[in-house]
Amino acid sequence: MKKDTGQNRSITTKWRPATRAVRGGTWRSEQGETSEALFLTSGYCYDDAATPAARFAGEAPGMTYSRTQNPSVQMLEERIALMEGADACRVQASGMAAMTTALLCQLSAGDHMVIAQAAFGPTRWVTDNLLPRFGIEATPVDGRDLDQWKAAIRPNTKVFFFETPANPTMDIVDVAAVCGLAREHGIRSVVDNAFATSAMQRPMDFGADVVAYSATKLMDGQGRVLAGAVCGDADFINNVLLPFQRNTGPTLSPFNAWVVLKGLETLELRAHRQSDNALEVGRFLEGRVPRILHPGLPSHPQYDLVQRQMIRPGSIFSFEIGGGRAEAHAILDALELVDISNNIGDAKSLMTHPATTTHSSLAPEVRAVMGVNDGMLRISVGLEDPQDVIEDLDQALRKAGL
Ligand SMILES: *Cc1c(COP(=O)(O)O)cnc(C)c1O
């Protein structure tokens, strides 16, 4: 397979992020295709018996089996690594496969980790229910409070894990402060950057060791496939994560890799427009509902931090309507344009009631500590004309008597 300049790191790392998103990791076959090829193959054939022997021994480059390598998948991995400014990246079958792989590959019985409590529901299930079964303890802290991170450190603490902005409370974690603290103590920091993506926030610029993604969201961007990714330095990815991934098999399908690869070419365009749209919708709602949690509005308690560490405040925000579950459901039921959906990062605007969907598996006490109440709604603003989204929300609020 012929590789163009998209393969040559010495050239590609000179490119700016938007260029890397379009060009990075492009390989070309002998056909010279413009668009990246889709390799739907599980295995590979060899010209002679010595070739696979050399590849299995790690003495020669080349593919052996698609649980381990596939050209379409590897193109995606190279593109994401370049966009992130990371040495290396490996992709997984979903965002949760990425989070689980990123944690289990480096933790052993007797280890301890600290997690910002306002994390994605299934991530909390992994840290609260799965890890303890293997003798790994996780301490949840308020990610906004550096003193809580400090106080939670033990001699056996191996990992700090957080999301920022967090779902659905829009809590912001100070990436430089928390990752700096981790580094001082020899702790590896892992940041779930799914809400922002590298188009709107670059955690490694602020000292993050590992950045993990649900690529299902803005990276695909059109609600088609599930995918995940983990980025880090070469030692972590190749020597810690890769042996775990190759042998346990949370592999991304080549088709899904190809869809995300093509989605990345428009990531910055979509993410920035969706963020701008979300700001317009947020400005409208600010005067219309009792409380709004929007990282792009000065009313957000951590607005200054958002300005420091984010390129754009993002396309997702939450708001409280003053009522409870009945009122929140009434608003969703009255929507005419915006869809009721717990997905995010789609070109279509989507709205959900976190307490009865994404965060329903958590105990009510855990939801209360996280700040997820029954009157909270979350919206992911898409690429429609924001005025239409505003008009739809306005009529839905009216119909619900608000
Ligand atoms: C969606 C999401 C995940 C999980 O990703 P899947 O692709 O659905 O498995 C993890 N973290 C965050 C912040 C998410 O939004």
Image: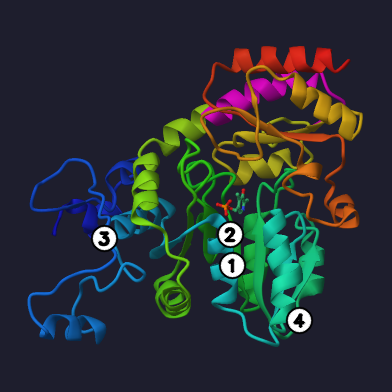
Of the numbered discs 3 and 1, the one sitting upstream in the chain is 3
The span from disc 4 to disc 3 (Cα, nearest Å) is 46 Å
Q: Residue 125, position in %: x, y? A: 72, 63
Question: Which amino acid type corresponds to the residue marked 2 in the rendered image?
Answer: Met
Q: Which residue is mark 3?
A: 41
Q: Secondary structure at mark 3?
A: loop
Of the numbered discs 4 and 3, the one sitting upstream in the chain is 3
The span from disc 2 to disc 3 (Cα, nearest Å) is 24 Å
Is 291 within the magenta?
yes
Of the numbered discs 2 and 3, the one sitting upstream in the chain is 3
- Name the residue nearer the viewer: 377 or 325: 325
Q: Which residue is mark 2?
A: 96
Label 2 C-beta lies within 8 Å of the nearest ligand 1 atom: yes
Quadrant of the image for the C terminus?
top right
At 11% from the left and 84% from the top, the residue drawn is 49
At 64% from the left and 75% from the top, the residue drawn is 184
**Residue 42 appears in which quarter of the rendering?**
bottom left
Question: Which amino acid type corresponds to the residue marked 1 in the rendered image?
Answer: Thr
Q: Residue 100, which numbered label? A: 1
In the image, taking residue 382 as reference, residue 241 lies left or right, namely: left
Magenta range: 274-293
| Prevailing SS of the magenta stretch | helix
Q: Are marks 2 and 1 in contact (CB under 8 Å)?
A: yes
Is 68 within the magenta?
no
**Which circle, 2 or 3, is nearer the viewer?**
3
**Residue 60 appears in which quarter of the rendering?**
bottom left
Q: Is residue 17 visible?
A: no
Q: Secondary structure at mark 2?
A: helix
The span from disc 3 to disc 1 (Cα, nearest Å) is 26 Å
The span from disc 2 to disc 1 (Cα, nearest Å) is 6 Å
Q: Secondary structure at mark 1?
A: helix
